[in-house]
Image: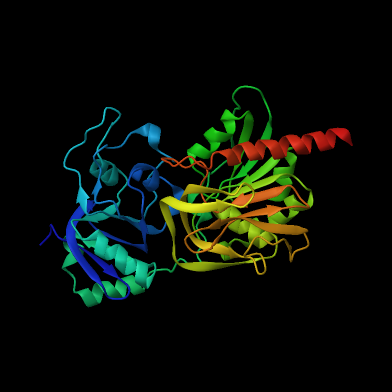
Amino acid sequence: MTNQAVLVLEDGRVFTGKPFGKTGTTLGELVFATGMTGYQETLTDPSYAGQIVVQTAPHIGNTGVNSRDEESSKIWVAGYVVRDSSRMVSNFRAESSLPEELNKYSIVGISGIDTRALTRHLRTAGSMRAGIFSGEAAQASIDELLATVKGAAQMKGLSLSDQVTTDAPYTAAHQGEYVGRVAIIDLGIKASTIEHMAARGLEVTVFPAKTDAKTLLESHPDAVFFSNGPGDPEASDGQVAVLREILGHKIPFFGICFGNQLLGRALGFETYKLTFGHRGINQPVLDRKTGKVEVTAHNHGFAVRVPGGENGETVESPAGFGKVRVSHVSLNDNCVEGLECFDIPAFSVQYHPEAAAGPHDSNYLFDRLVEVIKANQNLKGSN
């Protein structure tokens, strides 16, 4: 039957449904996202490159899609899995339907499967490789399809920054009173991040992932920012070397998501792959500086390990950058969700403070960046 689609997991589990989006074959790391809203922001987030995303919310697509809510220039997910695809679009902002958008970007998906059972399975077995096969591709035997899945690349050890980064530098103007200039390494940046910085008086220049430290320094930045992005931080030695040079100049640094992992590596700590990862827009995180619990947006399958800093103790950077503290921690599994340096002006968080489509508990981190920039400017002015 050409109107059939199958989802095959590398552990042999199979789900049968209907084609959704383009008909064909796609392979990737299968992960689930817990957001009940914001499917368009998820689809256009470059952090999801190489991943087949399962939406745990049962009904997807009712508000359609529109250009304003796009976080980048295209859909990046490797594949898309939903239980029920909306048969109609009902929103005054809609410019197209979700199925039309998936077809536009040749995204292979599957609908009509028990996503609750699938999520429970992944929650037990962990994220894994999988494949969606629809149309003629679904007619092969399960053994053949499983062999194809097992032949796919694993996320661990995979470098994907070059696939999602900008081709050339570009600048976004500040709004209101000018505060300073931020040099951004684009590892898979979202449009909302740039909007948050510009709204706070920051002029930003976005550089490709492989930009060297010399080029960044020649732009005379008041701060350097490493964005979110896909892939294994252990496969990003080049960006780690660049960051170490920036930290050595004591230029203010802020990193989010992948940028947090690279700061961890630059400071001399290890990163490791999480069994399940954190994805969605309802992850509780404790900010140890304020004592507040934030509901946050996540998409990460790797994390930083800080021996001795699990309970907020200050530890020494193994790479010689002074004292470091785990500033934020996940209340679900105690995973490191942020780093704060005391001897250099650097900090980072593992989650997404730009949080499109929400929640917005962590927007204050962009204000914290402005505070660090101004403090450093005052320090330079007094010397």
Q: Quadrant of residue 325?
A: bottom right
Note whether 188 is above or below 64 in the view shown. Answer: below
Q: In which quadrant is the N terminus drawn?
A: bottom left
382 vs 108, left or right, is right
Foreground of the two, 70 or 74? 70
370 vs 133, left or right, is right
Residue 251 x %, y %:
75, 45
Q: Residue pushed farthest bottom?
A: 143
Q: Quadrant of residue 10?
A: bottom left
241 vs 70, left or right, is right
Q: Residue pushed farthest top?
A: 176
Q: Quadrant of residue 144?
A: bottom left
Foreground of the two, 271 or 213? 271
Q: Residue at x 68, y 53 (%)?
A: 340
Would residue 192 be seen by someone viewing this image from the given angle? yes
Would residue 222 be seen by someone viewing this image from the given angle? no
